[in-house]
Image (cartoon, rainbow, N blue to C red):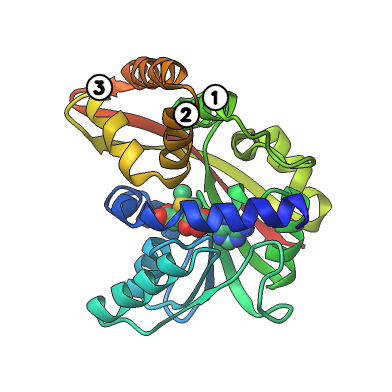
Amino acid sequence: MDPIERFKEQAKKTWPSFHAMEMQTAGAAPRLVRFAGIGRGANVLDVGCGTGVVALTAARVGAEVTGVDLTPELVERAKNNAALMGFPARFVEGDVEALPFPDAAFDVVVSQFGHIFAPRPELAVKEMLRVLKPGGTIAFSSWPPELYLGRFLALTASYSPIPPPEGMSPPPLWGDPRIVRERLGSAVKDLVFDRDVLRIPILSPQHLRVFGEKNLGPLSALTAKLEEQDPAKLELLRRELEALAGLYFEDNHLRQDYLLTRARKA
Ligand SMILES: C[S@@+](CC[C@H](N)C(=O)[O-])C[C@H]1O[C@@H](n2cnc3c(N)ncnc32)[C@H](O)[C@@H]1O
């Protein structure tokens, strides 16, 4: 199998437990919905929608929403969430690098910490803009490389026994405005950046590490592998994760700063 395809098959197996994180990412969703200017009747696509927190927040303000995600279990959960909330919403399985929608199908395309996990940013951009109407809005949230989640992703990558597939770009690069500007290029206009903070209530950095090992699939997969192959290295990783979280731990909350990007398709 092609290494990129193998990477995606592996990703599909690691993300299902993310449903436990929806209580956290739900806290950032209204900000992205407002930032993207989503209102009643807008036809919105949520890319890497997970359990649908952004799409369903947009549905609450009257948008017509579709969510797409690589992981079937999360798509199923998103459908259940829509049913629970009584909102009409469409959720489908799919890859941001090959979106299963026609050209110019949406008024707004959003992604909250989702499309950044596609291995090839140039394909993600191409596809997200292809399905957007000319003049439509693309808006997304991403993790700056120099702040908590960006550093967390770099730290865990440095412990991984399996190198990323060749040509894969690290997800936190999506949190650097200079790189985002380059990636969107002349395909967009009216590019705007902003920042916000997601505060996660948690008793201690140790609790956060244990919660992440259980519910953040890519970390669960890494710790399971290290447990099997190199328990001493796993203990080192655990101490480094707790020390990193300690730098961003304030008043029983973990502070996660993120970047917001918005632009219009030229
Ligand atoms: C950090 S979660 C964010 C989920 C959701 N947007 C939220 O805010 O709760 C990342 C999501 O990206 C999805 N994902 C990863 N690679 C993807 C790809 N190539 N295409 C579509 N979705 C992908 C995962 O399945 C997962 O649901």
Above or below — where is 221 with respect to 128? above
Q: Are marks 2 and 3 in contact (CB under 8 Å)?
A: no
Q: Report crowding for label 1: few under 14, some 14 to 19, many 20 or more residues within 10 A (C-alpha).
A: some
Q: CA distance from mark 2 to mark 3?
A: 30 Å
Residue ID for mark 2: 226
Q: Quadrant of the N terminus?
A: bottom right
- Decide if residue 103 is on the left or right side of residue 23: right
Circle 2: element type = helix
Above or below — where is 87 with respect to 143? below
Where, by quadrant of the figure, is residue 161 drawn?
top right
Whether the residue carrying mark 3 lies under 8 Å from ligand 1 is answered with no
- The residue at the point 39 percent across, 74 percent down is 76
Circle 3: element type = strand
- Decide if residue 42 is on the left or right side of residue 213: right
Residue ID for mark 1: 159
**Number of the front mark, 3 or 1:** 1
**Amino acid at dot 3:** Glu
Q: Are marks 1 and 2 in contact (CB under 8 Å)?
A: yes
- Return the disc, 2 or 3, that comes first in the chain's sequence: 2
Circle 1: element type = helix
Residue ID for mark 3: 250
